[in-house]
């Protein structure tokens, strides 16, 4: 049976080519190629890659999200993602300096993504049932090692202090509240690694927090501070609660993808929020 032109077009629109150029400190940078555009879409970090792809999902109405995006109440109208574009040369090789991946996103269930990832250099192909699984696949293919060291026993609760936020890129420190241990992260994937270690540590639920840990807990990030509790690990991702300490707001999140988008939209609105608070005063 011959494949119709419309079917071929639909298949084209399902695929994204991700050309990864660098991965220093697990900060993923590169370009996105999609059939809806004749230009490449550069991205500088995991969040910009994810939000750029979701902008295209919404434009082409595929795949449709199964859940509405949650936002903090201070972020009633989160700013829309404006795609950066670069005119692609006709002879430009759509290939990353480090790696090239072809992503086929089939569904957006559970506030996350489901689909397949084919890595062109290695010839390997995998399915994934969440954005978190996709990120772990990318990290493995890029030979990113998990962060070394052990966390002490404690609750799956951490405080994230964001000190730098530029073009959707996060830098700061993550602190396991009960143990008092603190580590610095330079990228969203590095942050994910540290959170994974907290989840995989033995959990002794305790309400006792030593003075040193409490003093670190009270510290604030230069841009924003969040406290995160992971409650469940279902559908290949994380579910829990996030408190934006600067506004004392608490939201539930249903996936790692939704978690980083909540942080991102909160940070985008920080200046607007401060202006609103000053007007009230």
Image: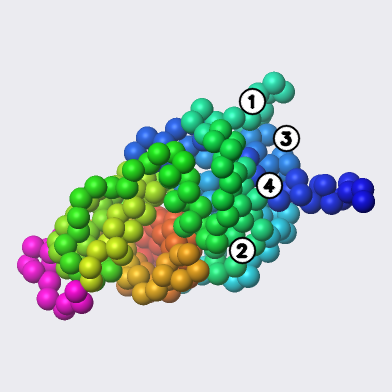
Which comes before the other along the chain, label 4 or label 1?
A: 4
| Whether label 4 touches label 2, CB < 8 Å | no
Q: Which residue is mark 2?
A: 108
- Near mark 2 (Cα within 10 A), the count class, few <14, some 14-19 or many ≥20, is many
Q: Whole-percent x and y of residue 56?
A: 66, 51
| Whether label 1 touches label 3, CB < 8 Å | no
Query: Who's the residue at 32% across and 70% down the image?
Result: 229
| Whether label 4 touches label 3, CB < 8 Å | no
Asked if one can make out residue 83 in the rendered structure from this viewpoint, the answer is no
Label 1, label 3: how many angstroms apart (C-alpha)?
14 Å
Q: Which residues are magenta?
A: 204-217
* Residue toward you, 198 or 92: 198
Label 2 element class: loop
For discs 4 and 3, the disc positioned in front in the rendered view:
4
Q: Whole-percent x and y of residue 15?
A: 68, 47
Q: Which residue lies most toward the right here?
A: 1
Q: Which residue is mark 1?
A: 93
Q: Which residue is mark 4?
A: 15
Name the side, left or right, on which 37 lies relative to 53. right
Residue 103 part of the magenta-drawn span: no
Give the quarter of the image for residue 112. bottom right
Query: Who's the residue at 12% across and 72% down the image?
Result: 209
Query: Who's the residue at 66% across and 28% down the image?
Result: 88
For discs 3 and 2, the disc positioned in front in the rendered view:
2
Label 2, label 1: how many angstroms apart (C-alpha)?
30 Å
Label 4 element class: strand
Label 3 element class: loop
């Amino acid at each position: 049976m011959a494949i119709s032109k419309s079917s071929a077009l639909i298949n084209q629109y399902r695929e994204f080519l991700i050309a990864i150029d660098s991965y220093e400190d697990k900060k993923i940078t590169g370009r996105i190629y999609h059939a809806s555009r004749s230009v490449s879409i550069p991205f500088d970090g995991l969040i910009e890659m994810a939000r750029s792809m979701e902008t295209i999902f919404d434009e082409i109405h595929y795949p449709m999200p199964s859940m509405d995006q949650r936002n903090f109440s201070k972020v009633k109208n989160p700013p829309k993602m404006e795609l950066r574009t670069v005119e692609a040369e006709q002879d430009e090789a759509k290939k990353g300096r480090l790696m090239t991946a072809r992503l086929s996103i089939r569904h957006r269930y559970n506030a996350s993504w489901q689909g397949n990832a084919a890595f062109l250099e290695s010839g390997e192909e995998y399915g994934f049932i969440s954005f978190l699984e996709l990120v772990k696949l990318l990290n493995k293919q890029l030979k990113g090692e998990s962060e070394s060291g052990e966390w002490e026993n404690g609750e799956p609760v951490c405080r994230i202090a964001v000190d730098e936020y530029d073009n959707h890129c996060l830098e700061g420190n993550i602190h396991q509240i009960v143990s008092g241990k603190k580590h610095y992260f330079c990228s969203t994937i590095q942050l994910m690694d540290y959170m994974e270690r907290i989840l995989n540590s033995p959990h002794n639920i305790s309400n006792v927090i030593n003075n040193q840990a409490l003093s670190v807990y009270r510290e604030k990030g230069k841009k924003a501070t969040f406290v995160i509790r992971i409650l469940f690990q279902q559908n290949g991702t994380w579910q829990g609660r996030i408190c934006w300490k600067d506004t004392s707001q608490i939201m539930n999140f249903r996936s790692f993808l939704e978690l980083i988008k909540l942080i991102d939209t909160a940070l985008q609105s920080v200046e607007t929020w401060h202006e609103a608070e000053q007007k009230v005063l």
